[in-house]
Image (spheres, coloured by chain):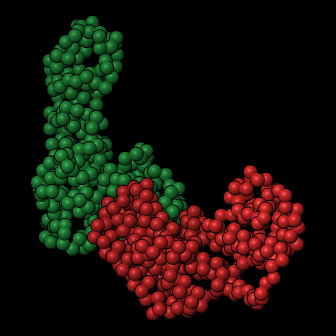
Chain colours: A green, B red
């Protein structure tokens, strides 16, 4: 295999479940040493995509190459170079941490020492605990440990931090960064935008089975042309102030877009610059005779990118 | 992998109960219920009437009869509940009421008839000599133990393998395992091997228990017994694999297992001989794998048969095992 060959490359992948098109012609290229994120709401086709890449599902159409090999020939040799974490797998509850890892280690012709992996995942205190007695975060770390124990060249992670508390998530992120520092390649799916931002060199936003945007997190945020987000609410609720508030806000200088915010009486305004948009916003409020009750500004995130591209929020599915 | 599977099994306390304790308890209870005992007295009910006193006098004189007085209206109930095996209504000649479907009632009728005829003056032409045979090897418990063993081998193979597979499938663990370089046949082999190790202990426990407590003999060689058990276990492992090869839920596989096993519990001669069923059913019953296994086990344990003598049974087992294994591998669902 040429060293320059992409870690993952697929083109025109299609997968149907009956009438439902789960993956609708997906192209993807992940370079070696990269951390690549598939980002999207639940049901966008992320899991189906990653399982096709892992060789667990056969695509209806399209071409897949993993580390320069295709599925269907010498799969065992290819599997030995992959680390796979599945979203829903539950390990045997009556095995201890160290036994589970030894079992998985035994499947791989080469790999890390079990004790190394336990140390890496900070599971030392739980070596002899049964899997059934571990907390959610510990189980999730163990599942990742099982993927790492074969010293894979390429690591697939399907929603690795779903359901974890913030501390456990950060621990796991730290671990993945160390794996990458050693030259590993990661392909992960997530519906947490902050996770994608923190971990990934490049992300692809997936919606309804196809990629709607691809690039580094910063590029994507810039691509919507409005790096700032202002969330503003007025005293007295939405009823206060002029009825055409949305148009008026949209007409302010350097404002790129306006939508109703999370709360009924709040607006989310995306802006190209704050130094022009904010004074104008204050002037608008003063002119209309409404009081600004709360105002926060933040830098745009991948979440805003997703909303800008699809018109619906991530969590809406 | 094999070791891991064993560990998991040993850590399942319920499993220990069902595999080891339950069959032993069953053997113990049945062994006691059907223990060889001296001939019990027959219970004879006597209805009130003109000749009652004479009847009671004639019957009470003998140890082998226990007389119970019965109201005329309660005859049917007394017979049904086994309170009296036969009920005698006085008269000339007396009337015997009994259920001929019950062997003990037929026996009681015979005994009472004899006694009353003799009391009325009948002379026996001669009295035959009797000789009782209660040697180990010919009692019910001797016949029962191989049947229980067969049933256990079936249960272990079917539940142990089928159930584990479906549990792992619903937990998506099967999918996780095939995502590693592990070869699929290795997984199935480990599952079966771990079961076989456990089964070996189980067979030893049950046979040893039966031997110590009831003196159940093993006429054939231990090696033959081991070989038959092994083949049986593999056969039912294959059938277990087949029943679990597609099922997606625990409920689903439980249903299939019961459908597969129930006919064999009933028909295959675990508790009573398969020959009790009518002749037209016999070819089917004889072709059932549990019938073949039980016959082979009985052959080895009771008749001292070798592997050659039990050949037809072993062939049936091998055919079932090989066939279901092949089909199971073909249709097996890994995810």
> Quick check: A35 above or below B61?
above
Viewed as shown, does residue B221 lie left or right of A53?
Answer: right
The answer to whether residue B302 shows anywhere in this view is yes
Viewed as shown, does residue A79 lie left or right of B27?
Answer: left
Q: Quadrant of residue A208?
A: top left
Viewed as shown, does residue A240 lie left or right of B89?
Answer: left
Which residue occupies 15% across, 42% down? A212
Choose between B257 and B49: the one closer to the eye: B49
Position of residue A35 measured from the top left corner of the image (x, y, whole percent): 25, 55
Position of residue B94 measured from the top left corner of the image (x, y, whole percent): 76, 64
Which residue occupies 44% across, 84% down? B313
Which residue occupies 23% across, 17% down? A281
Position of residue B128 measured from the top left corner of the image (x, y, whole percent): 75, 88
> Quick check: A299 above or below A169?
above
Choose between B42 and A316: the one closer to the eye: B42
Q: Quadrant of the C terminus of chain A?
A: top left
> Quick check: A298 above or below B108?
above
Choose between B230 and B14: the one closer to the eye: B230
Q: Quadrant of residue B334?
A: bottom left
The answer to whether residue A174 shows anywhere in this view is no
Position of residue B269 measured from the top left corner of the image (x, y, whole percent): 53, 74
Which residue occupies 21% across, 74% down? A74
């Amino acid at each position: 295999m040429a060293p320059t060959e992409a870690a993952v490359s697929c083109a025109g992948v299609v997968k149907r479940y009956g009438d439902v098109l789960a993956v609708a012609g997906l192209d993807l290229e992940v370079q070696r040493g990269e951390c690549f994120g598939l980002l999207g709401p639940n049901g966008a086709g992320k899991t189906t995509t990653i399982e096709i890449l892992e060789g667990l599902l056969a695509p209806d159409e399209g071409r897949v190459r993993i580390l320069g090999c295709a599925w269907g020939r010498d799969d065992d040799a290819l599997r030995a170079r992959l680390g796979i974490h599945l979203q829903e797998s539950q390990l045997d509850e009556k095995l201890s941490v160290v036994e589970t890892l030894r079992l998985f280690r035994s499947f791989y012709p080469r790999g890390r020492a079990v004790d190394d992996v336990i140390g890496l995942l900070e599971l030392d205190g739980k070596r002899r605990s049964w899997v059934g007695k571990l907390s959610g975060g510990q189980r999730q770390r163990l599942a990742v440990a099982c993927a790492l124990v074969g010293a894979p060249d390429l690591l697939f992670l399907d929603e690795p931090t779903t359901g974890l508390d913030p501390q456990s998530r950060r621990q796991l992120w730290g671990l993945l960064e160390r794996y990458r520092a050693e030259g590993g390649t990661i392909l992960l799916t997530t519906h947490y935008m902050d996770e994608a931002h923190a971990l990934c060199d490049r992300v692809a936003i997936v919606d309804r089975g196809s990629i709607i945007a691809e690039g580094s997190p910063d590029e994507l945020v810039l691509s919507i042309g409005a790096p700032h987000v202002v969330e503003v609410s007025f005293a007295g609720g939405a009823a206060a102030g002029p009825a055409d508030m949305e148009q008026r806000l949209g007409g302010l200088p350097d404002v790129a877009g306006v939508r109703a915010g999370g709360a009924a009486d709040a607006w989310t305004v995306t802006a190209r610059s704050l130094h022009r948009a904010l004074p104008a916003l204050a002037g608008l409020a003063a002119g209309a005779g409404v009081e600004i009750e709360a105002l926060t500004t933040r830098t745009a995130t991948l979440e805003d990118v997703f909303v800008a591209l699809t018109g619906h929020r991530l969590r809406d599915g | 992998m094999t070791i891991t599977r064993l560990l998991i099994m040993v850590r399942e306390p319920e499993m220990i109960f069902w595999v080891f304790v339950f069959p032993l308890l069953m053997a113990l209870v049945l062994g006691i219920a059907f223990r060889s005992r001296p001939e019990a007295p027959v219970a004879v009910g006597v209805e009130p009437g003109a000749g009652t006193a004479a009847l009671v006098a004639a019957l009470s004189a003998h140890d082998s009869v226990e007389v119970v007085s019965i109201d005329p209206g309660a005859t049917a109930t007394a017979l049904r509940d086994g309170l009296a095996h036969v009920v005698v209504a006085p008269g000339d000649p007396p009337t015997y009421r009994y259920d001929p479907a019950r062997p003990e009632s037929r026996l009681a009728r015979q005994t009472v008839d004899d006694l009353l005829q003799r009391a009325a003056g009948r002379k026996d032409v001669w009295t035959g000599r009797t000789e009782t045979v209660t040697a180990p090897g010919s009692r019910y418990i001797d016949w029962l133990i191989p049947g229980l063993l067969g049933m256990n081998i079936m249960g272990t193979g079917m539940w142990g393998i089928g159930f584990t597979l479906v549990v792992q499938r619903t937990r998506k663990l099967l999918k996780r395992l095939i995502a590693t370089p592990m070869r699929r046949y290795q997984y199935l082999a480990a599952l079966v091997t771990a079961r076989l190790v456990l089964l070996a202990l189980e067979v030893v426990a049950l046979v040893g228990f039966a031997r110590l407590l009831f003196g159940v003999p093993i006429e054939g060689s231990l090696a033959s017994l081991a070989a038959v058990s092994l083949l049986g276990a593999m056969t039912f492992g294959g059938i277990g694999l087949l029943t679990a090869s597609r099922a997606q839920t625990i409920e689903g596989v439980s249903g299939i297992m019961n459908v597969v096993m129930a006919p064999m519990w009933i028909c295959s001669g675990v508790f009573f001989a398969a020959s009790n069923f009518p002749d037209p059913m016999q070819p089917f019953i004889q072709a059932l794998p549990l019938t073949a296994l039980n016959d082979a086990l009985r052959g080895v344990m009771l008749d001292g048969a070798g592997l050659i003598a039990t050949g037809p049974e072993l062939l049936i087992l091998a055919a079932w095992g090989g066939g279901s294994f092949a089909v199971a591998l073909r249709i097996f669902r890994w995810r």
